[in-house]
Image (spheres, rainbow, N blue to C red):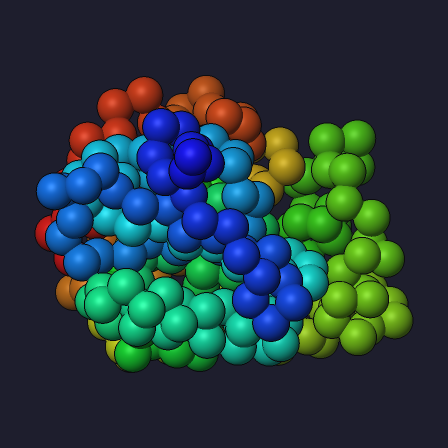
Amino acid sequence: MSELWNGFIIEKLLFEDRPACVVFPKEGTENGRLAAKTVYWDAFPEAAEIDLLKLGFHLCFVESDNRWGTDKDLDRAARFIGFVTNKYSLQKRVVPIGMSCGGLMAVKLAAKYPEIISCIYLDAPVINYLSCPGCVGDAKPEDVCIPMEEIYVALGLESMSQLIAYRDMPLDKIPVLLDNKIPVVLVAGLADRVVPYHENGQYLQRAYEASEIDFECYLKPEGDHHPHGVLNNEPVIKFILTH
C-alpha cells in the first residue's frame, strides 16, 4: 500500500545519501510542473504545497546538511531537482518554496542556478545573516533559538567580525535575481520578532519594486514569524501559476 502525505502519494528515497521525497498530484491532474520545498519539510504545507499538489504540481524535497545555503547543499538540491524532472518527465524549471531559513536557500539556489527556476515563493525569508541569527539588529535573543556557533560552523567562520565581512549572503544575491529576471512572491509579517522584515525581506521588496520584474508582496501587519502563509493564499497560488 502506498504511503500518503496529506492525502497524496509520497515516494521516499535516498539521494546521494540524504533523505529525500517526491509527492505526486492526484492521477489525471498532472501538469508537468514541479515545486521544491527547500528546508523544513512538513512545516506549514497549507501555505502553498497542498494547493499546488491539488492543481497538478509534483512536490520534492532533499534534506540539506544545514540551513545556511552552502554550495554543497545548493549543488545537491540542483542535482536532485534535475533527477526528479528527468525521472518523471517534468518541466525543467522549478518553483522553490522557502520559509525562514528556507527562504535564504531558495534565493541562493536561484542565484546559482537561475536556468532551473521559474519563480520563487518566499515566506518570512532570512535575507541578512546579521539579522538572524546574528541578533545585532531588532531580533531579540530570547526570540531566536539559533546559536551563532551553528552559522559559524556551517559557513566556515570563526567570529562575528568575519560574518560582518561575509559577502555570500542572500542579500548579496538580489542583483543576480534581478539580472535573471526571476519573479518573486513574498509573504511576511511586520511584527516578526525572529526575522525582522525591515532587516530582511524589505531589502528584496525595495530592489524588486525599483525594477520592472514581476513581484508581489503580501504583508501581515500584526504577523509574527509563525504561522507562515496567509489566510487567503489565492493570490500567491495565482502568481505561481502565472509564472
In the picture as drawn, the residue positioned furthest to the front comes out as 1
Residue ID at (41%, 52%): 22
Asked which quadrant contains residue 179, the reply is bottom left
Tell me: 216 left or right of 43.
left
Could you tell me residue 142's position as x and y percent?
Answer: 79, 30
Point out the image quarter for the N terminus. Answer: top left
> Can the viewer see residue 27 in this picture?
yes
Could you tell me residue 225's position as x and y percent?
Answer: 55, 32
Tell me: 113 left or right of 214.
right
Q: How many marks?
A: 0
Tell me: 163 left or right of 60.
right
Residue ID at (69%, 60%): 66
Residue ID at (33%, 53%): 35
Image height of 12 relative to 15, above or below: above
Could you tell me residue 174's position as x and y percent?
Answer: 41, 69
Tell me: 142 left or right of 229.
right
> Can the viewer see residue 126 in this picture?
no
Point out the image quarter for the C terminus. Answer: bottom left
Asked which quadrant contains residue 184, the reply is bottom left
Could you tell me residue 13's position as x and y percent?
Answer: 53, 57
Asked which quadrant contains residue 154, the reply is bottom right
Residue ID at (55%, 66%): 15
